Amino acid sequence: MNEPTSASANEIESRMRLVSLWTRHQRQVFGYIHALVPSRHDADDLLQETSVVVCKKFDEYADGTDFVAWACQIAWWQIRAARQRFARSKVVFDDTLMEAMAPQFAEMAREVDERHEALGKCLNKLHPRDRELLLTRYERGHGVEEAAQRTGRTLEAAYRALNRLRKLLLDCVTQQLAEGGVA
């Protein structure tokens, strides 16, 4: 078999970096987009469009710089280009307002990502039965009744446990963020 040329090896390495960065930060870019467009469906479409542009322009990304900021800038231009599609929506922000809000939404997306990571760590610390209660309760289409049944609790006991677990998770996430233990 032929050895890969250095150009193809560099190309493969670049693709691997792109996939790694995009996978790690896609949720933040989506949060940024969703904060600036009228609906989740529109945000999903714009995320796809943004990901295509990110792939096409990845060779312009400077290693060591803020990938999220770079990707959000691309998303910003995709949003601006799509504004005609949103003109028929009830709520359309004008360009000045969007320009003023965009940096705050980028920062909020980072904070939400940190909180999400902290929540994952805190969920992993729970007893499996408690974790199952919470995860079942918050699955789409499931309620407290099903969560109680799956974990062998009465409905009243499930409500009490959920209240206790929500407080426990809030305290844990707050502590994780205060300690900087999310990174």
Image (tube, rainbow, N blue to C red):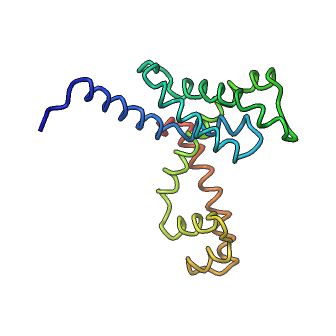
Of residues 94 and 169, the one nearer the viewer is 94
Tell me if residue 104 comes above or below residue 37 in the rendering: above
Of residues 78 and 33, the one nearer the viewer is 78
Number of dots carrying numbers: 0
Q: Is residue 18 left or right of residue 135?
A: left
Q: Quadrant of residue 77?
A: top right
Work out which residue is located at the far left of the displayed protein and give it.
1
Residue at 61% in and 49% down: 171
Tell me if residue 140 comes above or below residue 60 in the rendering: below
Figure quadrant of the N terminus: top left
Residue 62 horizontal/vertical position (percent): 44, 18
Residue at 70% in and 28% down: 81
Work out which residue is located at the far right of the displayed protein and give it.
90
Residue 174 horizontal/vertical position (percent): 60, 43
Residue 46 horizontal/vertical position (percent): 64, 38
Q: Is residue 53 left or right of residue 148?
A: left
Q: Quadrant of residue 140?
A: bottom right
Q: Is residue 134 left or right of residue 180?
A: right
Residue at 57% in and 81% down: 152
Tell me if residue 141 comes above or below residue 27 in the rendering: below
Residue at 68% in and 24% down: 103
Q: Quadrant of residue 149?
A: bottom right
Tell me if residue 177 comes above or below residue 72 in the rendering: below
